[in-house]
Image (cartoon, rainbow, N blue to C red):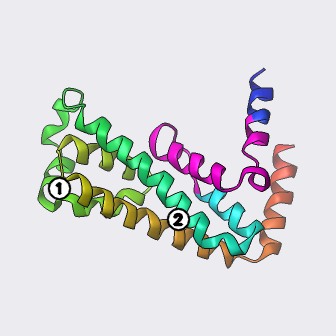
Amino acid sequence: MIESAVLWLLKFLAVPTVGLTSVFLIAFVSATLLPLGSEPAVFAVVKANPAMFWPTVLVATLGNTLGGIVDYWIGYRAKVAFAKERSSRWFHWLKRYGAKTMLLSWVPGIGDPLCTLAGWLHLPFWPSVIYMAIGKFGRYVFMTVTLLYVPDGWWKWLGAMSSKLFG
């Protein structure tokens, strides 16, 4: 049952069918609920249609930034949950550098918690969102351009190796 649900979800989110909607949803969810990378979805849309580079990067940035805003508001309302961590180096670092730390919101593993901690510390909302968007935009441009320069033969080889390893 779970396998059919996953297959249905993958079919529903198929890049050629849904495209930018999938990129937005995946980018949003990857910043909030699940440890999911949105770069493969961005790359797939751009690889399928290179003319969609900027719209795809902008939609992914918007979705991931909105997810970061959700993290910010969770942190803003979650003082009790983080009471123990008040003395950690992250809090001192965020207090010292303020909203500019949101430039690091793109970093896997620490970016989303940084957004949450920024909300907890009540860092200024709009400067945090602007820096968050700049960091996430830079990540999508860098990752997508980098992946586009990988030769197609390498992707075909990786696909063949994956199918041999995983069935």
Drawn side of residue 105 relative to residue 160, left or right: left
Could you tell me which secondary element the residue under label 1 belongs to?
helix
Q: Residues within 10 Å of mark 2 (few under 14, many from 20)?
A: many
Q: Which quadrant of the structure image shows residue 9?
A: top right
Instruction: Tell me the kind of residue under disc 2.
Output: Leu
Give the farthest residue toward the top.
Answer: 1
The quadrant in which the N terminus is found is top right
Q: Is residue 152 magenta?
A: no
If the image is split into quadrants, where does the C terminus sit?
A: top right
Is residue 22 shown in magenta? yes
Q: Residues within 10 Å of mark 1 (few under 14, many from 20)?
A: few
Q: Left or right: where does residue 21 sit relative to residue 130?
A: right
Q: Image point 66% across, 64% down: which residue?
A: 43
Q: Which of the 4 quarters of the picture holds residue 83? A: top left
Q: Which mark is residue 93?
A: 1
**Disc 2 target residue:** 58
- Which residue occupies 32% across, 62% down? 130
Q: What span is in magenta?
A: 9-38
Check the image and report above or below for 123 versus 11. below
